[in-house]
Image (spheres, grey):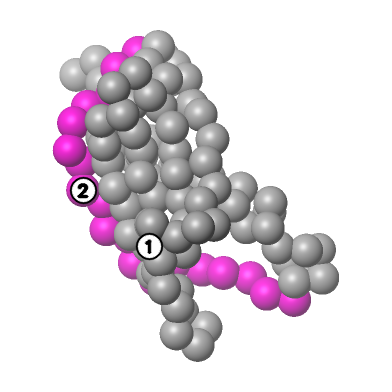
Amino acid sequence: MSADVYEHTIQVKLEHMDEMNHVNNVVYLQWTQDAAYAHWMSKAPPALRNQYKWVVLKHEIVYNSPAFLQQELVVKTWVYDYSGAKSTRVVQIVRKSDNKLLAEARTL
């Protein structure tokens, strides 16, 4: 894991749930995007943010275990590697109570 890890906590809410009473897969993708944006905004100075924009070429998400209503989750993200204008970002979503990895995404 990179030394420059950004993380924040999420409380699972009713709007995150699907008909099977766990967090919907699409929500994990949104959390992945939100974490990447928050990381970028917290680290990149305004001049850099104005000069460069990033776009997603590919997402890969592995779902290990479900999350449920009112659980606290920790979303961690970092840039794993880069080459030229491309980088690979990792996002891990972990249940706070037992540190269980629920989902991991890699974004190019």
On the picture, is 102 further left or further right than 39? left
The residue that appears at 42% across and 20% down in the rendered structure is 72
The residue that appears at 82% across and 70% down in the rendered structure is 47
Q: In which quarter of the image is residue 71?
A: top left
Looking at the magenta stretch, what is its main secondary structure?
Answer: loop
Q: In which quarter of the image is residue 87?
A: bottom left
Mark sitting on residue 62: 2
Q: In this view, does 40 lie above or below 50?
A: above
The residue that appears at 36% across and 38% down in the rendered structure is 93
On the picture, is 22 further left or further right than 30? left
Is 36 included in the stretch rendered in magenta?
no
Q: Nearer the viewer, residue 56 or 7?
A: 7
Q: What element carries label 2?
A: strand
Residue 37 visible? The answer is no
On the picture, is 14 further left or further right than 67? right
Label 1: few (<14), some (14–19) or many (≥20) C-alpha neighbours in 10 Å: many
How far apart are the alpha carbons under marks 1 and 2? 12 Å
Q: Which amino acid type is marked by label 2?
A: Val
Residue 76 at x, y = what percent?
Answer: 45, 44
Residue 90 at x, y = what percent?
Answer: 38, 57
Q: Nearer the viewer, residue 99 or 91?
A: 99
Residue 20 visible? The answer is yes
Q: Nearer the viewer, residue 7 or 20?
A: 7
On the picture, is 43 further left or further right than 74? right
Label 1 belongs to which residue? 107
Which residue range is magenta in the image?
A: 51-69
